[in-house]
Amino acid sequence: MRLIDLSSPIDASFHEPDPVRHEILTPRQGAVHMSEEMREHFGIAFDPDELPGGEFLSLDRITLTTHTGTHVDAPSHYGSATSYGDGVPRDIDQMPLEWFFNPAVVLDLTDAGTGAVGPAALEKELARIGYTPRPLDIVLLHTGAERHLGTKRYFTDFAGLDGPATRMLLDLGVRVIGTDAFSLDAPFADIIERYRATGDRSVLWPAHFLGREREYCQLERLANLGALPAPHGFRVACFPVRITGGGAGWTRAVALVDE
């Protein structure tokens, strides 16, 4: 079995709408900090130089959103109420693990350009690869957005799904839809431009807002989809971090390819 990492990194040097702050406490600083903590909280005097090499342990402090790096959006991210179930959307820690380890299929949308992709483009690609997603299959969209990772263009130049295309996949029983782009919807500027031109509210973040009437998860900001050896015949594991009450959770998405 070959493992292919499908995750983009969390990197404080990348351009982000919400910048990442990454502070590193070095092993030497950790020793000094530990000595101070022991004196303050336990009344124990301890010289950090007594430690081997004068070092203790490093520590990372990171400030970021749950939508930084590769992550899974929970139904509660899409709105405060649903038209299904008991009307209360589930948080990321409540989602069934069975959704996040399944056969997967990758659809090539690298020629789509910036904007919203409709059902016709998905149907054409599925016909080309000769595959129809089955219930609980994970569908991955290879838009090529990864080439702009770390830059402002990553948030402005990519293809997303429109409402009918998203509904088409959900009607097939798909519960996790992934993309290598910043969002499963089209870029903000593209959405607002089409809304102002038409006054049609259905163009406003349709992939996300559909989650208010159909329960599913988005797997965003993937990477390395071009390294997959075939459009299907592999599995994906993308278990989200269990953040209580969270609208999303980071994941180390991995493809498992049998050889």
Image (cartoon, grey):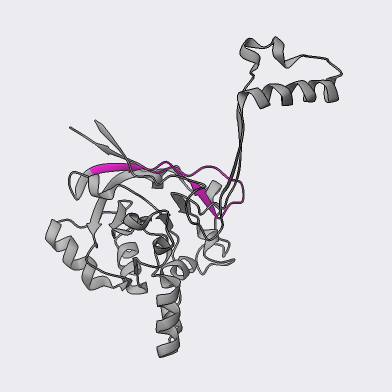
Residue 248 on the magenta segment: yes
- Name the spot of residue 77 as percent of width and height, x first: 53, 61
Prevailing secondary structure class for the magenta stretch in the rendered image? loop
Q: Quadrant of residue 32?
A: top right
Q: Quadrant of residue 38?
A: top right
Left or right relative to 27: residue 125: left
At a point 23% along the width and 57% down the height, the residue shown is 107
- Name the spot of residue 177 as percent of width and height, x first: 36, 57
Whether 95 is drawn above or below 44: the answer is: below
Left or right relative to 82: residue 4: left
- Name the spot of residue 66 as percent of width and height, x first: 54, 51
Left or right relative to 24: residue 8: left
Q: Quadrant of the N terminus?
A: top left
Q: Nearer the viewer, residue 87 or 195?
A: 195
Q: Nearer the viewer, residue 86 or 105?
A: 105
At a point 71% along the width and 10% down the height, the residue shown is 50
Residue furthest toward the bottom? 198
Q: Quadrant of the C terminus?
A: top left
Q: Quadrant of residue 229?
A: top left
Q: Which residues are magenta?
A: 234-253
- Name the spot of residue 125 as percent of width and height, x first: 18, 63
Left or right relative to 107: residue 85: right
Whether 38 is drawn above or below 138: the answer is: above
Q: Nearer the viewer, residue 47 or 228?
A: 47
Give the number of callouts: 0
Residue 87 on the magenta segment: no
Whether 173 is drawn above or below 228: the answer is: below
Whether 227 is drawn above or below 191: the answer is: above
